[in-house]
Every structure is written in C-alpha cells, then in structure tokens.
Image (spheres, helix red, strand yellow):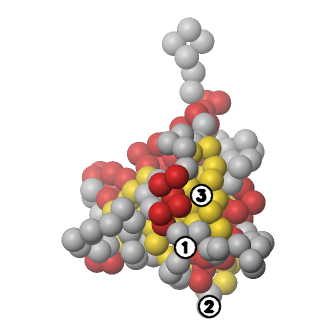
Amino acid sequence: MSDPAKKPATYEDLYNIPENMIGEIINGELIVSPRPGPKHMRTASALSMKIGPPFDFGEGGGPGGWIFLIETEVRLGENIVVPDLAGWKKERFPAGLQDNWIPVAPDWVCEILSPSTALYDRTEKKAVYAEHRVGHLWLVDVNNMTIEVYRLESGDWCPVKVFGGRVAVRLEPFQVVEIELGDLWLENVRSPSS
C-alpha cells in the first residue's frame, strides 16, 4: 500500500528508471522490476508463436481478428501496466496511436509470474485489469509449469481452470487452437549435445 503523504508517480518517473528494468505505475506507485529471465521469455515467446499465427494472422485456418503485443505499455486510467502478453480484438485496437502506451484495455492479458512481480500480478494488477474490464487473464507460473485461466464475469475474476505439465490444452479465449504446454517450458528445450 502506498504512503498517503507520498506524491503519486507520474509517467515522467518512468524515464528515470535504469534501462535494464521495467517500470509500471499501479495505484499511484512506481513499481520497478528487473527484465524477465530466460524461462520467462521462453514461455512468452512460445505462447506468442502458438496463438499469434492463427489468431492474429489467420494462418492454418485460424480465425484471425486479434492483435497481440509483447511487453507493451497499456494505460488503464492513471495506471501504466506492462503485461507480458496482451491481445485486442482488431475492431477495438486504436488507430493513429501518438503515445508510447495503448489507451484501450486489452481483451486478454497474460502475466508470467516471477519472484519480483508475482505479488503485484496476483493482487494489484489483477484488480486493475478487472476494474478496466479486461475479459480474460492468464497467470503463468514457469517454475511450476502451470497456467491459471480466468474469465471476467460481473466485474470479478472467475477461475476457469488450472492447467499444468506437458499436456495438450485448449485455453479460453483461444480454445480453437490446441497448445502443447510442454513447448512453453524452457526445461523441455534440449541442447544439440543432449
């Protein structure tokens, strides 16, 4: 919880953080966290490759109709959040962007939990996403190889299901495509010498 006597963070405060860090403003507080590690980035990259082609580009008979961005700034009221992955239905994505941030709440957000961000992702950011009517949220735990899927209903997050391990799954709102969870975890990538 932020100190009431402390001045709320502004967008200009983000310019003063080190280049190797990610800055967000959540409920008036400047949150600074390190860049994601290899396990985190493997999962983000793999998820992007799994859902991007069928849903963003309509490849392989996919439905298309979405725009996905990785680690982009999104302005939700006075909050500036940087979801690991975010997706908008194309008809809701704003044209003629002038700022660094996207001024429209995504339809889907994926947060990949890390020790420095898990608490905020599970509490304050999750609440901000609900307040701004993000329709779907995934919380991915790379250490435990799980994905928690949530759907927003009447302003509250309703858990859909927790998926884990190396099984093939269909995850809301992209259930048209089957995702092999084992492909998401860095532990499953083998070096040429193995």
Residue tagged by mark 1?
79
Q: Is residue 157 visible?
A: yes
Q: Callout 3, which amino acid?
A: Glu
**Count of numbered badges drawn on the protein:** 3
For the residues labelled 1 and 3, the Cα–Cα distance comes to 16 Å
Q: Name the side, left or right, on which 124 lies relative to 72.
A: right
* Residue in view at x 72 percent, y 56 percent: 118
**Marks 2, 3: nearer the viewer:** 3
Residue placed under numbered mark 2 in the picture = 154
Secondary structure of the residue carrying tag 2 is loop
**Amino acid under disc 1:** Asn
Depth order, front residue of 2/120: 2
In front of the other: 182 or 120: 120
> Residue at point 23% right, 73% down?
95
Between discs 2 and 3, the one toward the N terminus: 3
User: Relative to 56, is 4 above or below?
Assistant: below
Would residue 44 appear left or right of 49 to someone viewing this image? Answer: right
User: How many C-alpha atoms fall within 10 Å of the one at disc 2: few (<14), some, or many (≥20)?
Assistant: few
Q: Where is 27 relative to 68, above or below?
A: below
The residue at which mark 3 appears reads as: 111
Q: Position of residue 175 (x, y in %)?
A: 49, 64
Q: Position of residue 52 (x, y in %)?
A: 37, 53
Mark 2: amino acid: Ser
Q: Residue at x 53, y 61 (%)?
A: 13
Residue 38 in percent (x, y) is at 58, 34
Q: Quick one: 173 or 99, which is closer to the camera?
A: 99
Q: Is residue 80 left or right of residue 37?
A: left
Q: Nearer the viewer, mark 1 or mark 3?
A: 1
